[in-house]
Image (cartoon, helix red, strand yellow):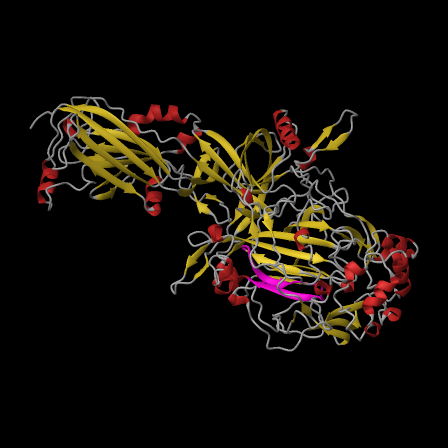
């Protein structure tokens, strides 16, 4: 559970705009894992200028002789073999070829797309969507490009205030299959949503896709891969967006560009912050960001860039040095063109696969549906749960696509086979998101997404032409899982206390490096490096509904054990260590504490400065103070505190000890007349299952916790908390008064410290009890069953009782006398709501078994076998944990059983 810090530690934010790119998780932003694959410009599917129709039949350019003129110029890469691929070039959707489909101002295509599910196969009824150069300029006076007009709410992105020119937006549908392919790990069977995913082409020769299987794969001799993170900063409450377009320079994940001057500064290597892992390779800049086709472009002489500079001479130099399909030509042209050349030198020709795991919440679909939008030039496909949701293939003008989450949810997207895609069989993740898991049936027999379930979004983008790289992305997805390629993040935390021994389990987004684990252990054992920071609420403002003050604690880790890899859920580590405050006083992790990795920072002016980050430094062999970082196995380091901290769950998991201390054979006389009468009056002549014993419940006091030795306290106080009171004149008669406990019997719950409870069991003057006594401790609602057999295995009686209603249990476990002083204290669970303490929240439960049969008859002399079964229900509560502290506890479901033999000597009648 992730909890947002309201007060206390601040977070250092990294700005997205300025020098680009930023490829680390940014707090308060939407972060997506991306794999960028760089291609050289001479790859057959890149730099083909097929966004325009250039066949010999096109009379608009070259007098119908474009192909011959291209071949006559003999530019490298544009030979007869290239031009012979006319079916691939000419099939690109554009205004000259009239191939593909055009988009309306409502965002829908003009023809039905059979590759989409039925509920996404809308056809436009609006006018054509047109994109081009705006009459108005940007704030800095640069040329703007955008849409001429579109319907509000259907399309987002730049809209012009009048257009100098605008062309209809075409794209090429049908380039990819409707289902992704997921390849499970051969050892574990788990699905890797980044490396185990494959997008499949349809096999049709469409828009330069001859080698489509190479676009999103490795080891093919063409692609070089970089793993990183795409950051969408917050633009308004709950909305995250980026907008890289012609008007501000475009999107270049492999370049570092000053967005103010458009000067390319360096490659986006790992050292420069462009990658999040060791895998960070690229071809480098091989293109110029200008439209420079290898034929006589009719507007070449008048063409300017967004800053108003003419680019014809730069284009001619590029062509003279070999042209757009020669890897060294752009660099050579740029070197000879001064500032203008460096402003346009870029690493185009890349593909990108992005991934986000998101949770569907029905409550987040009002007043507006959650969305994921994309607008960009060149290919884009979006899949949700492995099923195509947006199809924008081809090299094209900036084309818009939108994923409406509620539309997908209402139609069970990815859960069941849609009629339009029936020939493909079941969706690829149907076994992961099918009915009973992420999806559930409606009353009409259809299926929709179940509430609060996780789903998978993949997008595939390709930038294959050098004249522009527009990418607008916007989402209002409220809950995204942490990225794999971002900095190590604690997704969830739990402290399990088993018989007094605490183990902290952390679920991380990514594995830690072995060097980090070694550093954490060494630094913790030496007491020098607190690699984990804990924020403990010390002042909860109930009126504000938030914590007003935190005490920051440091955890010195002494052991780290890898537990398991949960695939998309993250990786689990068990850690142990000491938690201390700034005065070096040892503390314990408490339920509701917030936890995050520490990082080095000794700048006293920094907002993130605190006493614990100051300690993330060591002295090296040269006597220099150097920082130490928490680092993932992929090489990404923790560089800031997150806004969303993991909230710690406290799980108390004590071994249930069932104790039957009395071994007395000869017992005081037990009166059975009333019980016999109850049995005889029943329809079957038997006592009810809760009438064969009485339940003694004794809330445990604060002394039980504060003394430190809980087992010793129980031993010293055993008789007082489990023993029956001495009966008047040595016997109880028909009933006995319990002055300091609560009784639950067939007459209900009785007694509450000062209101005496009435029971049948008693002790004589020597302390010998009339009933058999079975005891256990619990802090959870429970159900108990005791079955009694004679030595031959014949059934004698049974007792079944429960305290399962949480409200009743809370009433019984809370004692206003023994827990005086705790009233009004609160715990602060995951989401910040205060929960009032239930005292120490533990009780001793004692079952006083009557020496009777199920028919209400007194037991005969002989040995008897007692079989005891106890079920403790999952329960969350607020408990006093000693030293004035309270904790929020998450106690798991438990079962326990016990069998013993006891003798009984019958006395009297």
Give the side of residue 136 with respect to residue 560, left or right: right
| Vertical relation: 849 (above or below) 226 | above
Q: Nearer the viewer, residue 212 or 737?
A: 212
387 inside magenta stretch: yes
Horizontal and vertical percent for residue 787?
22, 34
Residue 727 placement (x, y as % from top left): 18, 30
Quadrant position of the C terminus in the picture: top left
In this rendering, would 507 be left or right of 158? left
Question: Is 814 drawn above or below residue 576 in the view shown?
Answer: below
At x 12% / y 36%, what residue is drawn? 856
Taking depth in this image into account, of 55 and 620 the one nearest to the observer is 55
Q: Which residues are magenta?
A: 385-404
Q: Residue 410 in the image: x percent, y percent? A: 48, 63
Res 14 visible: no
**In the picture shown, does residue 613 fall above or below 4?**
above
What secondary structure do most residues of the magenta stretch adopt?
strand
Q: Which picture quadrant has residue 315?
A: bottom right
């Amino acid at each position: 559970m992730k909890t947002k810090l309201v007060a206390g530690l601040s977070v250092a934010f990294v700005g997205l705009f300025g020098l680009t790119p930023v490829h680390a998780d940014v707090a308060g932003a939407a972060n997506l894992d991306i794999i960028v694959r760089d291609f050289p410009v001479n790859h057959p599917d890149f730099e083909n200028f097929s966004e325009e129709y250039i066949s010999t039949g096109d009379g608009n350019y070259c007098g119908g002789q474009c192909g011959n003129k291209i071949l006559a110029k003999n530019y490298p890469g544009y030979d007869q073999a290239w031009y012979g691929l006319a079916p691939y070039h000419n099939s690109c959707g554009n205004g000259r070829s009239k191939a593909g489909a055009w988009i309306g101002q409502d965002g829908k295509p003009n023809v039905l797309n059979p590759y989409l599910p039925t509920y996404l196969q809308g056809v436009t009824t609006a006018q054509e969507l047109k994109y081009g150069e705006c009459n108005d300029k940007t704030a800095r006076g640069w040329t703007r490009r955008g849409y001429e007009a579109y319907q509000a709410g259907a399309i987002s992105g730049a809209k012009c205030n009048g257009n100098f020119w605008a062309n209809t937006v075409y794209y090429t549908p049908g380039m990819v299959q409707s289902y992704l392919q997921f390849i499970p790990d051969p050892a574990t069977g788990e699905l890797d949503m980044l490396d185990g995913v494959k997008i499949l082409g349809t096999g049709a020769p469409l828009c330069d896709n001859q080698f489509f299987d190479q676009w999103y794969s490795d080891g093919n001799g063409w692609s070089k891969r970089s793993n990183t993170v795409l950051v969408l900063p917050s633009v308004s409450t709950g909305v995250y967006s980026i907008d890289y377009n012609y008007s501000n320079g475009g999107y270049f994940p492999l370049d570092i560009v000053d967005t103010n001057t458009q000067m390319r500064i360096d490659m986006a290597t790992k050292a420069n912050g462009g990658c999040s892992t060791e895998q960070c390779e690229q071809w480098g800049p091989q293109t110029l960001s200008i439209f420079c086709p290898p034929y006589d472009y009719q507007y070449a002489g008048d063409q300017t860039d967004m800053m108003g500079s003419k680019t014809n001479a730069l284009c001619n130099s590029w062509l003279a040095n070999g042209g757009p399909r020669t890897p060294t030509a752009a660099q050579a042209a740029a070197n000879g063109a001064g500032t203008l050349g460096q402003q346009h030198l870029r690493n185009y020709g890349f593909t990108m696969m992005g991934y986000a795991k998101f949770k569907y919440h029905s409550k987040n679909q009002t007043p507006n549906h959650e969305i994921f939008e994309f607008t960009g030039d060149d290919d884009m496909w979006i899949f949700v749960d492995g099923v195509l949701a947006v199809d924008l293939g081809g090299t094209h003008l900036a084309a818009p696509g939108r994923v409406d989450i509620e539309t997908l949810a209402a139609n069970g997207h990815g859960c069941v086979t849609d009629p339009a895609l029936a020939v493909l069989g079941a969706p690829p993740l149907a076994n992961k998101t099918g009915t009973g898991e992420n999806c559930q049936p409606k009353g009409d027999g259809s299926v929709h997404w179940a509430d609060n379930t996780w789903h998978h979004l993949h997008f595939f983008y390709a930038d294959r032409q050098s004249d522009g790289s527009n990418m607008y992305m916007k989402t209002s997805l409220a809950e995204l899982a942490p990225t794999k390629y971002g900095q190590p993040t604690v997704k969830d935390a739990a402290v399990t206390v088993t018989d007094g021994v605490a183990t902290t389990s952390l679920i991380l987004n990514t594995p830690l490096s072995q060097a980090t684990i070694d550093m954490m252990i060494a630094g913790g054992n030496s007491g020098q490096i607190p690699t984990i920071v804990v924020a403990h609420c010390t002042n909860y403002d109930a009126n504000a509904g938030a914590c007003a003050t935190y005490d920051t604690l440091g955890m010195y880790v002494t052991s780290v054990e890898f537990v398991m890899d949960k695939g998309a859920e993250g990786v689990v580590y068990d850690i142990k260590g000491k938690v201390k405050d700034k005065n070096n006083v040892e503390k314990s992790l408490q339920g509701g504490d917030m936890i995050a990795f520490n990082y080095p920072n000794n700048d006293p002016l920094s907002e993130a400065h605190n006493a614990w980050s100051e300690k993330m430094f060591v002295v090296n062999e040269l006597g220099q103070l150097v920082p130490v970082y928490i680092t993932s196995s992929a090489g990404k380091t923790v560089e800031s505190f997150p806004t969303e901290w993991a909230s710690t769950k406290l799980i108390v998991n004590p071994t249930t000890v069932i104790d039957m201390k009395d071994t007395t054979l000869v017992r005081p006389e037990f009166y059975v007349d009333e019980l016999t009468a109850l049995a005889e009056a029943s329809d079957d002549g038997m006592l009810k299952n809760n009438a064969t014993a009485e339940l003694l419940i004794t809330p445990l006091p604060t002394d039980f916790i504060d003394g430190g030795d809980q087992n010793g306290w129980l031993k010293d106080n055993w008789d007082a908390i489990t023993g029956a009171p001495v009966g008047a004149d040595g016997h109880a008669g028909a009933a006995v008064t319990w002055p300091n406990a609560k009784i639950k019997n067939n007459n209900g719950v009785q007694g509450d410290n000062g209101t005496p409870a009435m029971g049948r069991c008693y002790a004589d003057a020597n302390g010998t009890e009339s009933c058999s006594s079975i005891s256990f401790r619990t802090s959870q609602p429970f159900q108990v069953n005791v079955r009694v057999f004679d030595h031959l295995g014949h059934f004698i009686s049974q007792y079944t009782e429960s305290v399962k209603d949480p409200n009743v249990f809370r009433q019984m476990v809370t004692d206003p006398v023994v827990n005086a002083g705790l009233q009004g204290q609160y715990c602060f669970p995951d989401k910040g709501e205060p929960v009032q303490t239930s005292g120490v929240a533990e009780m001793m439960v004692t079952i006083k078994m009557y020496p009777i049969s199920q028919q209400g008859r007194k037991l005969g002399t002989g040995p008897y076998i007692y079989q005891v079964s106890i079920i403790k229900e999952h329960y969350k509560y607020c408990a006093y944990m000693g030293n004035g502290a309270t904790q929020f506890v998450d106690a798991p479901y438990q079962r326990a059983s016990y069998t013993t033999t006891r003798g009984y000597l019958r006395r009297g009648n």
